[in-house]
Amino acid sequence: MSRTVLQVRNVTKRFGGLVAVNDVSFDVTEHSVMGLIGPNGSGKSTMINMISGSFAPTSGSIRLEGHELAGKPAHKVARLGVGRTFQLVRLLPELSVLDNVIAGAAFGHRRRWGAEAKAHALTLIERLGLSAVMGMPVSALTYIDTKRVELARALAGEPEVLLLDEWLAGLNPTELGTGIALIRSLRDEGRTIILVEHVMDAIRSLCDRCVVMSSGAKIAEGSPAEVLSDPEVIRAYLGDDDA
Amino acid sequence: MSGTDWRNLAISAALLGLAALLPVYGSPYWLTMGTTMAMFVVLATSWALFSGPTHYISLATAAFFGIGTFVTGLGFQSLPFWVLPPLAAIIGAGLAALVGLVTLRLSGVYFVIFTLGLAEMVRQVVTWVQNQTGHRGMYVLTSITEREIYWMLVGLGALVFLAGWLIGRSRLGFALRIIGNDETVAKHAGIDTALAKVALFMVPGAVAAATGAILAPRYIYIEPATAFAPLLSFQVVIMALLGGTGRLWGPIAGVIPFSLLWEAITRQAPNQTLLLLGIAFLVIVYLLPGGFVGLWDRLRRRFGGHS
Amino acid sequence: MFILITGLLLGGTYALIALGLNLQYGVARIMNLANGEMLVAGGFAAFWLYTAGQVNPVAALIVIAPVAFVANWLIYRFMLQPLVKRAKSRGALEVDSILATFGMSFAFVGIMTWAFGGGYFNYAFLAQPLEMFGSSYAQNRVVAFVLAVVIGGALWLWLTYSRVGLNLRAVAVNPASASLVGVDVRRASALAFALGGAVTATGGALVSMFFTLDASVGVLFTMKALIIIIMGGVGDIRGTIVAAVILGIAETAVARLIDPGLTLAAAYLLFLLVLLFRPAGLFGKARG
């Protein structure tokens, strides 16, 4: 059995009277892909935002290799080893593709600067198939390439845990195939990934384990096949008009 | 350092030498103009070091500058003059750090608003303290000539450019550019955005205070109403933006034409300076976003120059 | 007691001015730094109508408010909407609108100085004292306060209960969602901006009854209105009113007890406390 990298324990988040995440616990083991799924509004994004330090949980603990993340600001969380992409792609529009990636390398978990950072960024650009578009301004990139650049930036800091917040959303069928293959290759490299996703094919083919959330609570956990046949999960999805 | 670096260094050194020789070949009128321009070059360039990449518009220049003049006003009798500008710089940096710690964790609007009234607030407090202690204005009578003031400003300017060049190549400078693009991304990439902003904001704070300390002897008589005149902050913003903050040399390109225009307007229609300032702001926003630097880059791109 | 009541009277007028700016910033997303000049213009108009035409300042509001409404609508339509259209992000719009309204602010001051001269102006309207609670207060201050309360109250009722008011509040909360449910965001923003300007000019006319104004004093009022908005919370009417009263009382207290030259410093002290402890406003929810 492999080692637990990220440990989420009894995490609750309230916004005023609304409980967005209610007493959720799960573990993420090393070199695995954990899927975080559930209907819209189930609290997945809130969970991701708490792990990455966008906001603090109301109560509970999030530990990365023994370091408490709950309540720490985002930059400290990033340095401790959490990298992320955003649900709506966020690139640095005035910077080149290369500088966008170096941005992740210069201040992240493993920090590099100067020639070393540049070489590292170039390796990642090559690895993610961005070499051909490297000279283009960021605003001229295709949609999947913007997603690739963002992924390269997140990878550049060599995070212990990578959070992909609906990274595959909005891709066309061909791109989706490419995207799934890319994430699979990251898993094969031994990276630890948390995947928030709606695309069922991706969940089935990529995830080692899944946590299913509904209305802020964890309703199921297990392998994709197990959780997707769980009656409560089916009810949660079909009972919601976004199924 | 690459070949272009050496070329730029050579050009900069030549221009600096040319600027430093102004008192030798120029008339007294041009020395006075040159001193004013040198002051604005120093202020606008250091302003752009922070406000350029972050897009946080600082209107605190007058506050730092005024504090610098008061450092000289209070200290010139007991301390050697050469101590005063560095001392003012330390105090200016300290105040900038305080202002930054309070406002820079928050969004840019808070920062603009806070700095907008800062000079006026400091002026009120200084006036009040002076009233309490029975002092009004101060005479700064020194043997320092305008020529020396000018040279000190040119020296300070060289320092600012050096600092700007170093910051541009540093992690801090890169962090600030990322913050200016997207602060959320910056945080999640591992940048302590508040710390980076405060650290860099101390640079214009220190420089403006040192500039005030150097220029104090020129005014001879210092009182809060003139030392903290808020207009200075706006002039600096206009000149920096007119030139463009995208390059280190941008603000100079704004300072020279605007100082000449300002001088002409104050001589011929002194009541219209504010109107000019207003129109200049509007011209920048509507016609010249990016300033002359932006225009230059657009022209170069259009006419096929290498990029 | 005297300080409290004088502060309250002052705060009432401040509230109206800040309400105007809050409409412009909260709904139209324009940080209008020329707001103080609109106030001074309103004051000028009242002064001019009173001295040249013997028009009662209260009656003059019937002219001043609609004129300011139209003027601000034109400013929004032709100067600010292009900025809104070209802005790539909220941050870019903020920088552009700050610079543009600074430009307008200076241009207005320049024009007003040119048209009316740089001197101070005031006029004597209802300058007699009024006895209340054992002290006397200038009647014009009391009248200004009452009018501010009436106008502010009417505005609040309209925003809370009318259909158009609901649209404006929807845009304030989230322009994208508001447009999804059929609100014309551009029209709502223009309306809010024009209305905000009219409210501010009205506030200026009221202020001119008891305050000596000059062409360049506008920025001071802009500053105060901004501090009030931040203290009260952007888009929060109740917060704005409470913050305005607090500022009015604090200024009066400092002016009476310490030194009249320190009013802005007093405002800054409040500002500082808010920034340090309640950056989302008095009633705002702290957000991590």
Image: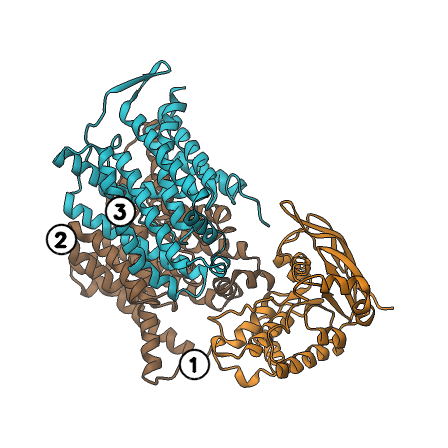
Chain colours: A orange, B brown, C cyan
- The amino acid type of the residue labelled 2 equals Ala
- Mark 2 touching mark 1, by CB under 8 A? no
- Give the residue type that dot 3 points to: Ala
Contact check, label 3 and label 1, Cβ < 8 Å:
no
Callout 2: residue from which chain? B
Quarter holding residue C119? top left
Tell me the distance, in whole angstroms, between the alpha carbons under discs 2 and 3: 29 Å
Residue A41, placed above or below residue A14: below
Q: Which mark is residue C68?
A: 3
Residue C145: percent from the left, percent from the top? 34, 30
Q: Name the residue located 49 percent from the left edge and 72 percent from the top edge.
A: A95
Furthest-top residue in view? C134
- Mark nearest the camera among 2 and 1 is 2
Question: Chain letter of disc 1?
Answer: B
Judged from this view, the residue extending furthest toward the right is A1
Would you call the spot at circle 3 few (<14 residues within 10 Å), some (14-19), or many (20 or more)? many
Depth check: give the residue in front, A148 or C198. C198
Dot 1 corresponds to which residue?
B3
Residue B134 vs residue C46: left or right?
A: right
Pick the residue in front: A138 or A97: A138
Where is residue A7? Give x, y as percent: 77, 58
Query: Residue A171 location in percent, x, y?
Result: 60, 77
CA gap, disc 3 and disc 1: 59 Å
Label 3: chain?
A: C
Q: Name which residue lies at 44% across and 39% down.
A: C240
Density class for disc 1 (Cα within 10 Å; few <14, some 14-19, many ≥20) is few
Q: What residue type is labelled 1?
A: Gly
- Which residue matches tag 2? B269
